[in-house]
Amino acid sequence: MKVLIVNPPHTAIGSRIPDDHLPPLGLLSIAGPLIDDDHEVDFLDAEFGPLPISDIVSAIERSGCEALLLGHSGSTSAHPTTAEIARRAKECRPGLIVIYGGVFPTYHWRDILREAPEFDILVRGEGEETCRQLVNALGRDQPIAGIRGLAFRADGEIVSTPPQPMIRDLDAYRIAWELIDFERYSYWGGKRAVVVQFSRGCPHPCTYCGQRGFWTQWRHRNPEVFAAELAWLHRKYGIEVFNFADENPTSSKKMWKRFLEAIIAENVEITLVGSTRADDIVRDRDHLHLYKKAGVERFLMGMEHTDEKVLAKIRKGATPSTDREAIRLMRQHGMLSLATWVVGFEEERDRDYWRVLRLLLSYDPDQIQSLYVTPHRWTPLFGDIRHRRVIQLDQRKWDYKHQVLATRHVPPWRVFLWVKTIEFIVQSRPRALWRLWTMRDPKLRHAHKWYYAMGRRVWIHEVLGFVFRDKRIKDGPSVAEYWGENHENEEALSRGRSEISSPPTLEPERLVEAS
């Protein structure tokens, strides 16, 4: 079967401001098994440019594909653009089969199939095995009702099949690296880069995060096989920077240490960046030198908040003292720390922002990133704040970098002023600037300067956007009215075996308009 996989252009600040772009690991992971099954697979990355929708549709027409696969890692904020591509592609080629996957369609499949006729089939949960079975069935003109992990229309009804069993062996499906031009992708200031994934999921129950629900269970690749693949990418394609897509790659102390030792044994000069938890850094204090030797330059640590009561409420399982110690340990071992701070878990007052500023200064992080609470219907947080009012109706702005919720005590303009002021003060404090200009490690100095340059550009873009471009409303709907019911307990994957021994039972969904 002839298949075209398209990575839609993303309107989020993180996609548009940097000069660097990273390849979409999820789509390449879908492509590998399809190529191995002898399907003709092409790939279009519309992030470059970004490519106008008219040019994307023209490329779809020229490709002559029988099936169009769409998906994006930022699936909620990318959905409007994805839907527009699908709609216009269908107008040009009514017989085209449009397949759509990702986190957003996994949990919003009912709404999408009801409201967007341009999508034919939605893939729910992990896509490697589901897409493989689906495209094989479509290519042979076989029914798809026996394939798990799907949602589609049948005889006028919207139906879903039971969840696909989660993939237990993450090394069983290869990534189609051959579909990309490595010279086009870079990160960390023009260095050739790719996205990789050592593990999926996270064992921690943070209420605002959908990783636990979507991936079902934390799993990891074979550490030695994974290290060998990174070394191969470096030697064959000159990859310098590996950006980990994992939510928490260090969850298993034993497996992560095995990976570090394996990549050190490969003897390659590479840079590793990603995200982890502060308590994992503190846990590994005795072998943090291995992090540095393996190439770790920076870890984003989701500290989320500085108040212990808020951390307990969102079930973060962390403490301010652990966060401070992790930052100290990373600096001691020659690594950069990026501390994230999330605004809006509680309806803060002005005095709360002043307290946050003082505490962040005491943490003394190398870099800081502020985000806004963005409730998704598949997270426990959704139920806790379903009554809050939405002030941003444009779904493309639900990217964690825009205010989407109102607060009772502080108007949006003052929230924004506090956030930008805190960022400026923390990033520009004399100690941080002195550290930047006296840094001896040339790789760290390059990385640190690049982040400061990107930070300035994003900061200015956000200010101009808030003042001139972003449209907010005063009396918006509640979160529940905007998104619908909570799907926290809806499984994206089952914990069964990957192999399907018998066809699943079709589950029709009779949809009615929400009251």
Image (cartoon, grey):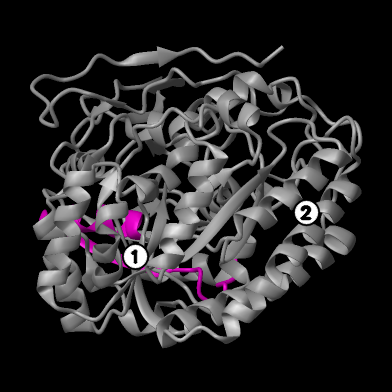
Q: What's the residue type where badge 1 is placed?
A: Gly
Q: Nearer the viewer, residue 144 or 206?
A: 206
- Label 1: how many residues lie within 10 Å, few (<14), some (14-19) or many (20+)? few
Q: Name the residue tied to disc 1.
A: 64
Residue 125 x, y percent position in the rendering? 34, 35
Report the Cα–Cα distance between label 1 and label 2.
Answer: 48 Å
Q: What's the residue type where badge 2 is placed?
A: Val
Tell me which residue sits at (71%, 27%) in the image: 479
Quick check: 214 left or right of 57?
left
Tell me which residue sits at (89%, 61%) in the image: 467
Which of the image's four quarters has the N terminus? bottom left
**Residue 31, quarter of picture:** bottom left
Residue 177 x, y percent position in the rendering? 23, 69
Residue 274 x, y percent position in the rendering? 40, 59
Nearest-to-viewer mark from 1 and 2: 2
- Label 2: how many residues lie within 10 Å, few (<14), some (14-19) or many (20+)? many
Q: Name the residue tied to disc 2.
A: 419
Residue 364 vs 194, above or below: the answer is above
Q: Nearer the viewer, residue 32 or 59?
A: 32
Tell me which residue sits at (54%, 23%) in the image: 380
Q: Nearer the viewer, residue 259 or 384?
A: 259
**Residue 137, quarter of picture:** top left
Residue 278 x, y percent position in the rendering? 44, 47
**Does the magenta segment cover residue 37?**
yes
Which of the image's four quarters has the C terminus? top right
Residue stretch rendered in magenta on the structure: 25-53
Tell me which residue sits at (16%, 70%) in the image: 264
